[in-house]
Image (cartoon, rainbow, N blue to C red):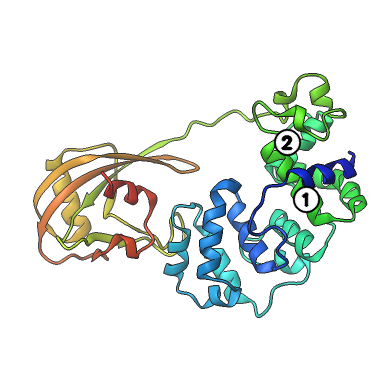
Amino acid sequence: MDVKRLLAWYQANKRAMPWRGNPDAYAVWVSEIMLQQTRMETVYGYFTRFMEAFPTFQSLAAAPMQDVLKAWEGLGYYSRARNLKRAAESIRSLPDTIEGWRALPGVGPYTAAAIASVCLGVSAPVVDGNVSRVVARLCRLSGDTRGAPARERLAGWLQPFIDRSGQPGEFNQAMMELGETVCLPRSPKCSHCPFSQTCLAHAAGVEEQFPERRAKKTIPERHALAFRLSDGQGRFLLVQRPPDGLLGGLWELPNREAEKKTTAVSARPVFQARTGLSPTSVRYAGTVTHVFSHFRLQFHVYDVKASGKPGNGCVFALPDALPLATATRKALCL
């Protein structure tokens, strides 16, 4: 690997991002957490708004969790936001070692290496999906490159190159940038790659065969009945999810998992059991689909009119004031 060529390519082609060139470890930390399983273009706006709301880790630690989740709304993988806040609450100062970063909730080997290399100059290779793809093609590596043991081997292969660079933060960012913008999963832009003359997969014309792809798993489908009830003043009946687990702490329409879409008649007792209210009118409004990482949700929405006082944690609230689950946000727009 020609390290000088890589760094020169990065200087000429890196995208402008608000956290780049920023020595603030907190800003880098937030950006790296947001970038986990999320494309850089998506993160840009969220990062800017998040840093405006919580400019320091102390302000993040002091903020209500609901405010943090609201700032994260729509970005997905909400455990990242919960762990970020809990980590901020657990420290008095930002870690100054890679081991210190790894000890924080939500910070694994990849994230710790990224932060430590950029902010502390630690010579620790970052191996994410983009980097593993670059190396797999460069070396024509067979086998799975996604598991932890495989990524440890890739990090070992990269170690002498990052040591040689003298700029570990720039090296890691260059490798990630190359994978995200040039060495794409499909139709890679090999003519723009600084390694085009030495890449073994490119030389053989088999770039898209590396890394080897896992067989796609069938995503199961789940169904839920959801109930939309307004008080006529812009407020809707909502309920908060438990603080941990899937969508922990977010708010959603009262709902109940079901085998499949049902009828308005059979939805009545489900609504009453879920909310404690007596339905006077139930009408099917439509179905929204939301795909999670491990299942697809069909959210069958019913408009309801009812009498009584809500129970089981259900309250009338303004949707824009609360962090909402995406399926509920979609349902309110039906």
- The percent coordinates of residue 223 (x first, y second) are 32, 40
| Image quarter of residue 8 | top right
- Asked whether residue 151 appears in the rendered view, the answer is no
- Mark 2 Cα-neighbour bin, 10 Å: few <14, some 14–19, many ≥20: many
Q: In the shown orientation, is residue 78 left or right of residue 15?
A: left
Q: Residue 259: image x %, image y %?
A: 29, 38
Which residue is rendered at x = 47% and y = 34% of the image? Answer: 219
Q: Secondary structure at mark 1?
A: helix
Relative to the observer, which residue lies in front, 26 or 18?
Answer: 18
Residue 220's x, y, as percent? Answer: 43, 35
Q: Of label 1 and label 2, which has the lower sequence position?
A: 2
Q: Quadrant of residue 230?
A: bottom left
Which residue lies at the image location 57% right of the left edge and 53% below the top edge? 44
Q: Is residue 235 left or right of residue 101?
A: left
In the rendered structure, which amino acid carries the disc numbered 2?
A: Arg
| Front tag of 1 and 2 | 1
Name the amino acid, label 1: Asn
Left or right relative to 263: residue 217: right
Outermost residue to the front: 12
User: What residue would you read off at disc 1?
Assistant: 172
Residue visible at 66% across and 29% down in the picture: 213
**Residue 225 seen in render:** yes
Q: Residue extending furthest left?
A: 280
Residue that carries the numbered disc 2 in the rendered image = 133
**Quarter of the figure that contains the C terminus:** top left
Pick the residue in front: 244 or 16: 16
Question: Where does residue 104 sit, x and y in percent of width and height?
Answer: 65, 67
Q: Which residue is pictured at 57% across the width and 71% down the height?
A: 55
Looking at the figure, which quarter contains the N terminus? top right
Name above or below for residue 109 compared with residue 206. below
